Amino acid sequence: MSNKPSLPQGTRDFGPEVVRKRQYIFNTIRSVFELYGFQPLETPAMENLETLMGKYGEEGDKLIFRILNNGLDNTAKHQQAREDFEKVLEGKNVKGITERALKYDLTIPFARYVAMNHGQLTFPFKRYQIQPVWRADRPQKGRYREFYQCDADIVGSNALLNEVELTNIYNDVFTQLGLTGFELRINSRKILAALAEFCGGAEKMVDITIAIDKLDKIGLDKVKDELSQRGLNEEQISTIEKYLLIDGNNEEKLNQIEQLLGHLETGKKGIEELEFVNRQSGVSNLVIDFTLARGLNYYTGIIFEAKAPATVKIGSIGGGGRYDDLTGLFGVPNIPGVGISFGVDRIYDVMDELKLFPEGVYTGTQVLFFNMGAEESSKAFSTMQLLRKQGVRCELYHESVKMDKQFKYAEKKNIGFIVIIGSAEIQNNTGVVKNLKTGTQQTVSLADLSNKLFI
């Protein structure tokens, strides 16, 4: 018996209609990236495992898809190989078993690219990248194991003007897509570092950010329990609770954080950065959110998270931040950077749920030429080729069958117009043009057929 075809969990096929809608999102994002002076880049689907490991924090490293080395079938019988394989299953790295992995995001491969090519790049280097990434996550609504990211990064500049531009890129893209209810939340890792310093030292930073990053999922009480399990005392946890309960508009939040952490140098710098971006961006949906932690180890300054409109229960649809020495991980220090990412799969789900895709997105073929016989189809084909040269997307029905069947084909494919060239039309050098949406039709000279008729 043949196996029933299926897909790996967390992956999807995309049919023509879905692909068109996704391309609409990709093209909107790409056009905004280009408008802001970013250049395209692509990197391989797989990276060396050592390139990725240790860059995404404790939780992120567990979600990296490792690729088994070739030839393991022959060695798996041996005791050492079995022991090595057990270590891999525990999340450890064993070169004999796995040396490569699917890329987890686009940022670390980009940093690797910059480190390898910094001698040839013009800085600041502004790149965008639209490619799939893979995460060994538990599949659920809005969370997939294979999904696309659309990133924009600027490296080689410390200027906060870059952060201001990135907030505006988010705003421009979401406005063009019709996502008017989005929120762009920002915080600074410097403020989180100051909180860690205030609660016992820099070594507490990872413990605190990992716990805070789970606030939306598990709630304040369970965050406090996790902080306790991670070794923080009651006084430290009380300080973190005060921090997490800061509320009000952006100005009020900045005043409150000033009182809590403004006496620390790191905290003061973080507050100044947030004040600058808040003042300069001009984005009305910008929200300062001190609960935003983004548990990736490489962020050092401003961090971003874009939230879907509250009417849709999907959550984050983008994020990013500043990383002042990411290329230093690859032996090329002192190249600061900042970047953002769009979660296209989630953006798609939000737009689909809110019915935000414009009607034109669904249209592939604009005009169907009916097949009325051998001589008629030959004339239809030559006429169709002239329309294609004018940019009209058209096709000729593949065989001469009843007109009812050809009409149904046009309707199922959402084709807006049909052209009928029968024997009478050949003699008169005309064609019958019918608008399937309005039901109106007209007889037109073939010499006058043009793209203007099919708008």
Image: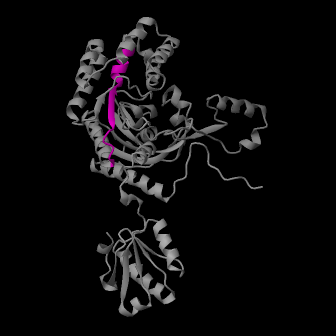
**Which one is nearer the viewer's eye here, 402 or 52?**
402
> What residue is shown at x 22% (from left), y 23% (from top)?
251
Task: Give coordinates of residue 277: x percent, y percent.
Answer: 25, 31
Task: Give coordinates of residue 377: x percent, y percent.
Answer: 47, 84
Task: Give coordinates of residue 205: x percent, y percent.
Answer: 43, 18
**Which one is nearer the viewer's eye here, 29 or 76?**
29
Residue furthest to the bottom in view is: 427
Please state if 68 lies on the left or on the right of 104 as rendered.
right
**Residue 137 falls in image quadrant:** top right
Quadrant of the image containing the N terminus: bottom right
Quadrant of the image containing the C terminus: bottom left
Please state if 393 lies on the left or on the right of 5 as rendered.
left
**Which one is nearer the viewer's eye here, 24 or 303?**
24
**82 in relation to 397, above or below:** above
**Which one is nearer the viewer's eye here, 237 or 297?**
237
Q: For residue 194: magenta? A: yes
Residue furthest to the front in view is: 439
Residue 173 appears in view: yes
The span shown in magenta is 177-196
> What residue is shown at x 25% (from left), y 24% (from top)?
249
**410 in relation to 314, above or below:** below
Task: Give coordinates of residue 279: x percent, y percent.
Answer: 20, 30
Q: For residue 367: magenta? A: no
Residue 123 appears in view: no
> What residue is shown at x 51% (from left), y 86% (from top)?
373
Q: How is the image coloured?
A: one colour
> What residue is shown at x 32% (from left), y 29% (from top)?
186
Report the number of numbered marks: 0
